[in-house]
Amino acid sequence: MTGKPAILHLGLGAFHRAHQAAFQQNLIDAGDDSWRLVAGNIRPGGEDTIAALIDQGGAYTLETVAADGARDYLRINALSAVVPYAPGIIELLRAGADAQTRIISFTVTEAGYYLDAHDRLDATAPDMSADLDAFERGLAGCTIYGALAAILRRRRAAGAGAVTLLCCDNLRSNGARSRGGLLQFLELAGARELRDWVEQHTTSPNSMVDRITPRPPVELPDRVRAATMRDDRAPVMAERFVQWVIEDDFRNGRPAWEDAGVEFVASVLAHEEAKIRILNASHSAIAWAGTLAGCRFIHEGVADPRIRRIVHDYVSDDVIPCLSPSPLDLERYRDTVLERFGNGGIADTNARVAADSPAKLRGFVIPTIRDRLARGESIAAVAMLPALFLATLRHRAGADALAPADPASLAIARAPDPVLALCADESLWGGLAGDARIVAEIRRACERVARQFARA
């Protein structure tokens, strides 16, 4: 890799292509093509899409859908190179170790960081154990830590210089927490010198990302063809709304993303907490409740008065008091979020939004319970969310659809006392596990859920 400075992105999924790559395209369209964007996956998956992108020279079409149903189509040419997955991720290692790579960004979903309620790395997870073993044998692993550790080891050996590690996932304090996980991984691997090098030669700015991006529907290529006269085997769709807020802490330069609509701030805390507790938690709540109500799509759940009331009360009664005072208009943000979720043109499914539900419960919902209890305040409204999660697990169709590979969640659902089993899970609650106040309130919330959703 020579010439222009580059960003290497790990996790070439729909969200990256609708979000970060779209911002990069905005910058190019504004006349600034001084940075390259290279992307690939660190584990198998999406091979057909990757092959299509390679055949199309990295180009694809982004369909955006407004709340009124209007659709626009943007050609994205921001991907300078698409790296197909191969065991050992040799090409990604090579790209990451190139001195022209100044930023390594990544999207691996909330569950991909293997952090417990105290931000301790779960070294016992099978993927993590395998990655630690692979690293000690000089190989790259399949988790974000195993991949980053291998890339940074090679980068250090090559003398390629400093680099920014930019997390783009919906993870609270995503830069600090992903960095903490990486440093713990290196400590467990006995890589003290590399750990010291990472601390001295990298930064990990926190960021807040936002754009509803459903899985591309099968009919999307036909819509793209009809609107653009272009055959595209790798289009992606998203809502019109998009936001990216980043702490301006880059170690070795960055694109002028502010010219493309990115907001650079000293701290993302206010934006992050509002987004995680209001948007992300509400999104999950609608998915859980919508499944119980027999809905397939998020917008159908928003149209259900029962579900809309649960979400409205959760935000108004329990979240906004926790986040106030705030530089943001939280009530307006709440209303905007519900309007966005009601966009039927997105056709976002409950199953997609409810993926990795335990991680979302832990990261998006439980912090509000913790804050409310610490303030000596009621948790009646927020308790409805874990109650909905539990009711969805106990509903056979929901359990099959939402957690087929989550034996821990299924064990909770099948326990003699599911409420007690849920509330006793230390991986979710940390020091609050088994708290009698939480158990009692979630029991009451489960009764309300049962009355409102007869199928639960």
Image: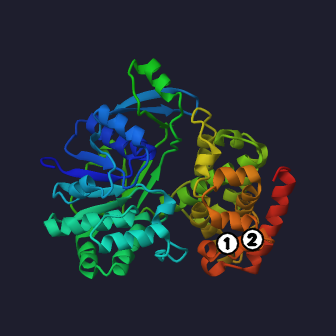
Query: Can you identify the residue that label 1 sits on?
Result: 372
Question: What amino acid type should be assigned to the residue bearing mark 1?
Answer: Arg
Q: Secondary structure at mark 2?
A: loop
Is 292 positioned to the left or the right of 71 in the image? Answer: right
- Look at the picture and state if 374 lies above or below 226: below
Please give the name of the residue rendered at 60% of the width and 67% of the height, measured from the top-left corner: 362
Pointer 2: residues within 10 angstroms few (<14), some, or many (20+)? Answer: some
Query: Can you identify the residue that label 2 sits on?
Result: 378
Pointer 1: residues within 10 angstroms few (<14), some, or many (20+)? Answer: some
Please give the name of the residue rendered at 71% of the width and 78% of the height, measured from the top-left corner: 376
The percent position of residue 295, horizontal first and vertical second, equals 72, 41
Q: Is residue 114 among the parts visible in the rendering?
A: no
Q: Are marks 1 and 2 in contact (CB under 8 Å)?
A: yes
Please give the name of the residue rendered at 50% of the width and 36% of the height, measured from the top-left corner: 216
The percent position of residue 196, horizontal first and vertical second, equals 25, 79
Query: Based on the displayed image, in which of its 4 quarters is residue 230 positioned?
Result: top left
Q: Earlier in the sequence, mark 1 or mark 2?
A: 1
